[in-house]
Image (cartoon, helix red, strand yellow):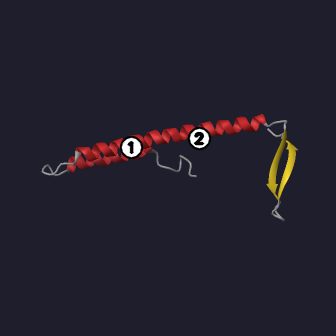
Amino acid sequence: MASTSEITSASNIQMDYMNLLITQLQNQNPLEPLDNNEMAAQLAQFSQLQQLESMNTSFSEVLNATQRNYANSLLGKTITFYSQDEITGELGQKVGIDVCG
């Protein structure tokens, strides 16, 4: 999964679109103006993209906090888990005490 720093944010895409739109409006043929409905639909899509991007960030933060809380709840407790043997490939039960922080 790509991080948000690797993905162009919705705000940046929207700013690029607005700059392109302004240039189009400045250079359009007066006899064939741009379709207002199409522009409004594209702006609505950018708004939805921004909302999804914001939700994704929020969910990611909640997931990280939940994982940290779960890991902290295991400290000092006996933990039972299953692990696959690298040589035989068999699944075996392991038991241990989590003492790392």
Q: Is residue 73 above or below residue 20?
A: above
Secondary structure under the numbered disc 2 in the rendered image? helix
Asked whether the viewer can see residue 38, the reply is: yes
Res. 36 image quadrant:
top left
- Please give the name of the residue rendered at 33% of the width and 46% of the height, measured from the top-left corner: 42
Q: Give the image quarter of residue 40.
A: top left
- Tell me, yes or no, if residue 18 can be seen here: no
Residues tagged 2 and 1 counted as in contact (Cβ below 8 A): no
**Circle 1 crowding by C-alpha within 10 Å: few under 14, some 14–19, many from 20:** some
SS for callout 1: helix
Residue at the far bottom: name it: 87
The image position of residue 97, as x and y in percent, is 86, 41
N-terminal of the pair, mark 2 or mark 1, is 1
Which x, y percent locates residue 48? 41, 41
Q: Which mark is residue 60?
A: 2
Residue 49 in the figure: left or right of residue 25: right
Query: What residue appears at the point 54 percent right and 40 percent down from the top-left corner?
Result: 57
Point out residue 71 in the picture as x, y percentages from the top left corner.
Answer: 75, 39
Q: Is residue 61 above or below residue 17?
A: above
Residue 19 tag number: none
Residue type at mark 1? Phe
Q: Residues within 10 Å of mark 2 (few under 14, many from 20)?
A: few
Q: CA distance from mark 2 to mark 1?
A: 21 Å
Q: Which residue is mark 1?
A: 46
- In this picture, residue 40 sits left or right of residue 55: left
Q: Residue at x 27, y 47 (%)?
A: 38
Image quarter (top left, top right, bottom left or bottom right) of the C terminus: top right
Amino acid on which the number 2 mark rests in the picture: Ser
Is 93 left, or right, of 13 in this rendering? right
Which residue lies at the image location 63% right of the left edge and 39% below the top edge?
Answer: 63
Q: How many marks?
A: 2
